[in-house]
Amino acid sequence: MTKEFGLESVDFKYVDISSPEVLDYIDDVNNIVENRFPLPYVSVNKKPVAWGLDDPEEIFIKITNFVNSQVK
């Protein structure tokens, strides 16, 4: 790859996929791909906005950010 794209364009890094953060991320991605969102699940206009959050303030922030991003 470095031959094709140049040494400064390719950067390989080691990712420890056994760390709790990465395993949580992989689990979230798998759930999203398989349309299995952890509860509580909140959608706006059939679009997923927040899932798996227990803190109402975090859920409210996600909803507010989503709604604000939809305003043009």
Image (cartoon, rainbow, N blue to C red):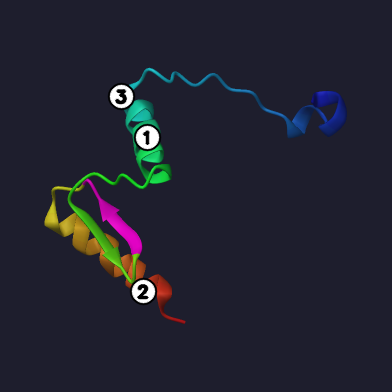
Residue at position x 31%, y 44% in the image: 36
Which circle's residue, 3 or 2, is located before the other in the chain?
3
Circle 2: element type: helix
Q: Is residue 72 above or below residue 32?
A: below
Q: Residue furthest right?
A: 3
Place residue 62 in its image quadrant.
bottom left
Report the residue marked by disc 2: 68
Residue 20 image label:
3
Question: Would residue 51 be counted in the magenta stretch?
Answer: yes
Tell me the quadrant of the picture where the N terminus can be found. Answer: top right
Question: Would residue 50 be counted in the magenta stretch?
Answer: yes
Q: How far apart are labels 3 and 1 at the CA level? A: 9 Å
- x then y, percent, for residue 34: 39, 42
Residue 25 image label:
1
Circle 3: element type: helix
The amino acid on which the numbered mark 1 sits, given as a three-letter code, is: Tyr
Query: What range is drawn magenta here?
Result: 47-52
Residue at position x 49%, y 21% in the image: 15
Residue at position x 83%, y 30% in the image: 6
Circle 1: element type: helix
37 sits left or right of 59 in the view: right
The amino acid on which the numbered mark 3 sits, given as a three-letter code, is: Pro
The amino acid on which the numbered mark 2 sits, given as a three-letter code, is: Asn
Which circle's residue, 3 or 1, is located before the other in the chain?
3
Q: As rendered, which of 44 and 66 lies closer to the eye?
A: 44
Assess disc 1: are there few (<14), some (14-19) or many (≥20) residues with their C-alpha within 10 Å of its C-alpha: few
